[in-house]
Amino acid sequence: MYKIERAAVYSPTQANREAYAREMSAKLGFPIDAVESAEKAVRGHPVVAAASSARGAEPILLGEWLDRCRFLCAVGNTRVKFAEIDERCFRDARIVVVDTPHALEEAGELVRARKAGALPEEKVVTLGQIVTGKANVPAEGLVVFKSVGTALQDLALAARFYEKIGASVGVPTARNFAVAK
């Protein structure tokens, strides 16, 4: 099983991020640091999950912060007028995995990235294509997963995708997944 030794969390509300960090550190058994910016939460981490309630056109996570990121999972924004991650995340990605082709019309950051030329069609695959082996995860580079699906669907598909990406880089496969609320 892949061992997580430490994590960082950011929320614009200091009390919320500190309470979450305390609660989840105790529950998960490893330290979770409450940090004062989204940049500090993601910079230097190989795996980043963006699950925000951002309600604006300006992204809250910038690709320039993903200096060592291998896997970016963006599941917060599901509306065409909002953005959670910026165009550079898609431009820098070797592959962009979507849970459904409809995501390309539903998620604002995907719509903007396509219009800007940062997300050519040949870079996009569905998670179903990964799971069935019709598309492969590259052995190197940034992989972005953008979801507009349900939480249960996201969890099931992300677990399978994690197994695929872990195998491609020699990470032991996780057999047990836990969801923290």
Image: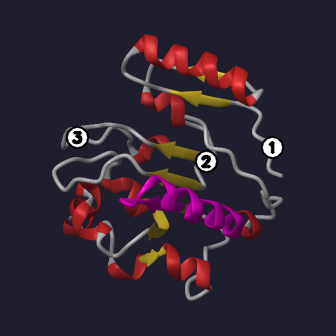
**Residue position marked by numbered label 2 in the rendering:** 47
137 up-or-down from 32: above or below:
below
Q: Residue at x 54, y 21 (%)?
A: 20
In this rendering, the label closer to the viewer, 1 or 3: 1
Image spot of residue 28 (x, y percent): 72, 30
Name the residue located 53 percent from the left edge and 14 percent from the top edge.
18
Identify which residue is drawn at 43% across, 68% down.
99
- Magenta-colored span: 143-165
Colour basis: secondary structure
Q: Residues within 10 Å of mark 2 (few under 14, many from 20)?
A: some
In the rendered structure, which amino acid carries the disc numbered 1?
A: Lys
Residue with the mark numbered 3: 58
Does 52 appear in magenta? no
Looking at the image, how many numbered discs can be counted on the residues? Answer: 3
Picture quadrant where residue 54 is located: top left
Residue furthest top as drawn: 15
Q: Quote the CA–CA distance across marks 1 and 3.
A: 34 Å
Percent across and percent down for residue 57 are: 18, 43
Q: Residue furthest bottom?
A: 134
Instruction: Report if residue 67 is visible in the image.
Output: no
Looking at the picture, which amino acid does disc 3 mark? Glu
In this picture, residue 36 sits left or right of residue 104:
right
Tell which circle, 1 or 2, labels the residue nearer the N-terminal end: 1
Q: What's the CA distance linking mark 3 and mark 2?
A: 22 Å
Alpha carbon distance from label 1 to label 2:
12 Å
Q: Is residue 90 above or below residue 3?
A: below
Q: Are marks 1 and 3 in contact (CB under 8 Å)?
A: no
- Residue 138 horizontal/vertical position (percent): 61, 73
Circles 1 and 2 in contact, beta carbons < 8 Å: no
Please report the residue visible at 60 percent of the width from the left and 78 percent of the height from the top. 131
Q: Secondary structure at mark 1?
A: loop
